[in-house]
Image (spheres, rainbow, N blue to C red):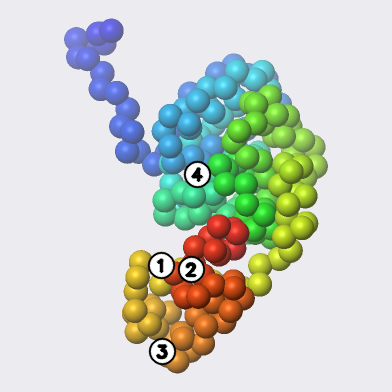
Amino acid sequence: MTAPSGRVPRPASYASPVTETPHDHRPAGSVRVLLAEDQGMMRGALALLLGMEPDIEVVAQVAAGDVIVDTALAHRPDVALLDIELPGLSGLDAAAELRERAPHCKVLILTTFGRPGYLRRAMDAGAAGFLVKDGPVEELASAIRRVIAGETVVDPALAAAALGAGPSPLSARECDVLRASADGATVADVAARLHLSGSTVRNYLSAAIGKTGTRNRAEALRQARHRGWL
């Protein structure tokens, strides 16, 4: 369609980290939702489906974790619906920041990776709910309403798995060292990044390898990620 000026309007850029959802005429009591998902097709589908609910309004969409908090402060959503694996900042780290800087906003984690370790970290970060993406949208809409009502909503199968798995055996510093070595960095590289001595890095790596029951740091990293400890 041609604009009145005779120019053809350009489509919105997919590279933009924040998408403002157009306002409609929903009731004043609608639940305002911020949606954080890096896959454009999934983000658009979720926004469309949630937008069909009469009492839910998606007020903003973001594709990166490091803009979540600023977007929440600007749009003041009631609920932030966050994926875990996002560029810039993970949804779990963003949840912890939201708890500090935007305590009015409830956090609901929605992820492909239903790992018990992720669930524990989400609850520690102050999330009010944790669901996996293979559920129906009606279940997601219900979860949004329930967290607004003050409930904690967790996928039942994942909750049972988390209870059986127990807490992560890794210390915060052991996790830091494993993350820093993820790209094949040498001990010296990791030490420089984390401002530690080489011997301290070796000790942390040795401890992480022992706690994960693996043979080397690459295996320890894979195991920690698989368990959701990182």
* Label disc, if present, on residue 219 of the rendered structure: 2
Query: Would residue 107 appear left or right of 145 to someone viewing this image?
Result: left
Image point 72% across, 34% down: which residue? Answer: 143
For disc 1, the marked residue is 182
| Disc nearest the viewer among 3 and 2 | 2
Tag 1–tag 4 contact (CB < 8 Å): no
Location of residue 90 in the rendering, given as x and y in whole percent from the top left corner: 50, 54
Which badge, 1 or 2, is on the more N-terminal residue? 1
Image point 51% across, 41% down: which residue? Answer: 36
Location of residue 23 in the rendering, given as x and y in whole percent from the top left corner: 52, 23
Amino acid residing under circle 4: Thr
Location of residue 210 in the rendering, given as x and y in whole percent from the top left corner: 58, 79
Amino acid residing under circle 1: Ala
User: Is any part of residue 87 visible from this angle?
Assistant: yes
For disc 4, the marked residue is 71
Amino acid residing under circle 2: Glu
For disc 3, the marked residue is 198
**Could you tell me how far apart the alpha carbons at marks 1 and 3 are, in whole angstroms?**
16 Å
Query: Would residue 220 appear left or right of 193 to someone viewing this image?
Result: right
Which badge, 3 or 2, is on the more N-terminal residue? 3
**Could you tell me how far apart the alpha carbons at marks 1 and 2 are, in whole angstroms?**
11 Å
Which badge, 4 or 2, is on the more N-terminal residue? 4
| Disc nearest the viewer among 3 and 4 | 3
25 vs 153: above or below: above
